[in-house]
């Protein structure tokens, strides 16, 4: 199945807010919440995408011809590519009635694993969402990364028990979800966390812990102090705070501040294997891609996911070869123009 066919099929299954656009750039859905749009003016999702397009590739084919290798190691696991499916929750609310969260994860998690990558799964106000997400990961030998919302410590502890039971090889928290409108004034409460609270959460996890929602060097250093094993440079697709910079704009300074002492992921507007190359050249270890994987599931289920992974993988390999980078470690910042 070609990815163009996946997108076409998705349009008959997805909506009403998401339109399964040929280019998922945040323009059409802009500020639709519920839906895949961004908060406030809705321009941050658009900016995320646009700023990656401003980064250009420095081609150099005067090099030895070798086989391109894209394998990526993370917490003792080896993956075919340095990109992963990002966490999405409440798909029925935001993307249409075709799938429940359990049905979505039961397609996404094994499809990603079979394609040589892993899926981050989402959390939600409905406690059942995390139960179903961790069950989906459990069915596939723990090959997934559950993402927990920044609830109160008691609720997080309960959800960490579900994570451990699933056998997941790592866990994440999208701490920036504290700004989601539908997480306000809840019981249990959700919100920001101090460094000391994060230290407690890292201990609860007992497996590698990734903190998603880092947008400044200062926040990256606080995450490091808390003892997390990795961060995700992310503004939550523009859904938590209007008028932020894009992730492409802040990534280099965060990479410099961290100094290679923990894994750095980045998301936000990354859509192709070429974008993945740009992110790695700017210093990221790997990337997350969320919205297009929803389109892939709605447009072709497991086959749709495989098609999208193969497309991005082929684009990444081609870009690496045309820049003289034949392994991920050979991708350097002088291979991009910005």
Image (cartoon, rainbow, N blue to C red):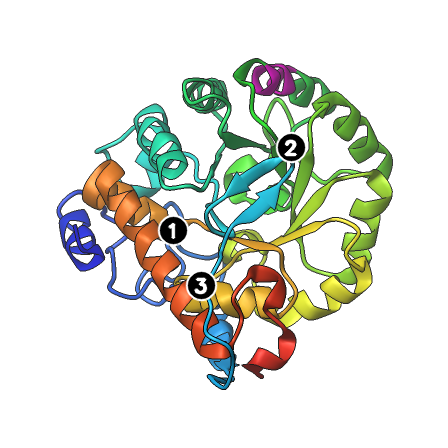
Which quadrant is the C terminus positioned in? Answer: bottom right
**Nearest to N terminus: mark 3 or mark 1:** 3
The mark lying in front, picked from 2 and 3, is 3
Residue 32, position as x, y percentages in the image = 37, 54
Question: Decide: marks 1, 2 in contact (CB < 8 A)?
Answer: no
Quadrant housing residue 175 = top right
Judging depth in this view, the residue of 208 and 115 nearest the camera is 115
- Contact flag, marks 3 and 1 (Cβ < 8 Å): no
Q: Marks 2 and 3, how far apart in space?
A: 48 Å
Mark 2 lies on residue? 190
Asked whether, in this view, residue 206 is left or right of residue 12, the answer is right
**Vertical arrangement, residue 159 with respect to residue 96, above or below:** above
- Residue 162 belongs to the span the image colors magenta: yes
Residue at (44% x, 77% y) in the render: 322
Q: Is residue 23 above or below residue 168?
A: below
Closest to the camera, between mark 3 and mark 1, is: 3
Q: Mark 3 — residue?
A: 67
User: Where residue 59 sits: x, y (%)?
Assistant: 47, 84
Above or below for 38 versus 122: below
Mark 2 secondary-structure assignment: loop
**Mark 3, secondary structure of its residue:** loop
Indicate left or right for 69 with 149 as reference: left
At x 49% / y 57%, what residue is drawn?
Answer: 69
Q: Earlier in the sequence, mark 1 or mark 2?
A: 2
Q: Say which residue label 1 marks.
A: 291
Dot 1: what SS? helix
Residues at marks 1 and 2, CA–CA distance in whole angstroms: 24 Å
Q: Which residues are magenta?
A: 158-164
Give the percent coordinates (x, y) of residue 91: 35, 36
Are the residues flagged by discs 2 and 3 in contact, CB closer than 8 Å? no
């Amino acid at each position: 199945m070609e990815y163009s066919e996946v997108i076409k099929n998705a349009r008959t299954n997805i909506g009403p807010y998401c339109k399964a656009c040929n280019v998922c750039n945040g323009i059409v859905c802009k500020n639709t919440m519920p839906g895949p749009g961004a908060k406030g003016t809705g321009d941050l999702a658009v900016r995320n995408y646009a700023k990656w397009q401003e980064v250009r590739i420095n081609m150099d084919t005067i090099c030895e011809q070798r086989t391109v290798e894209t394998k990526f190691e993370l917490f003792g696991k080896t993956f075919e590519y340095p990109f992963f499916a990002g966490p999405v929750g409440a798909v029925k609310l935001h993307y249409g009635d075709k799938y429940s969260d359990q049905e979505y994860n039961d397609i996404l998690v094994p499809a990603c694993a079979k394609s040589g990558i892993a899926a981050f799964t989402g959390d939600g106000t409905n406690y059942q969402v995390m139960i179903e997400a961790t069950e989906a990961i459990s069915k596939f030998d723990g090959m997934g990364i559950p993402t927990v919302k920044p609830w109160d410590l008691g609720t997080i502890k309960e959800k960490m028990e579900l994570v451990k039971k699933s056998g997941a090889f790592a866990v994440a928290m999208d701490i920036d979800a504290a700004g989601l409108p539908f997480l306000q004034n809840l019981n249990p409460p959700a919100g920001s966390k101090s460094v000391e609270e994060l230290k407690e959460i890292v201990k609860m996890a007992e497996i590698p812990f990734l903190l998603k929602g880092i947008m400044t060097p200062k926040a990256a250093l606080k995450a490091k102090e808390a003892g997390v094993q990795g961060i995700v440079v992310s503004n939550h697709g523009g859904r938590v705070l209007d008028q932020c910079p894009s992730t492409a704009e802040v990534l280099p300074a965060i990479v410099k501040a961290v100094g290679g002492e923990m894994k750095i992921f980045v998301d936000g507007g990354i859509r192709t294997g070429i974008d993945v190359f740009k992110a790695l050249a700017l210093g990221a270890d790997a990337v997350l891609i969320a919205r297009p994987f929803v389109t892939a599931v709605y447009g072709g289920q497991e086959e749709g996911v495989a098609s999208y992974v193969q497309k991005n993988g082929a684009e990444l390999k081609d870009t690496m070869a045309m820049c003289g980078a034949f392994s991920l470690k050979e991708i350097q910042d002088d291979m991009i123009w910005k």
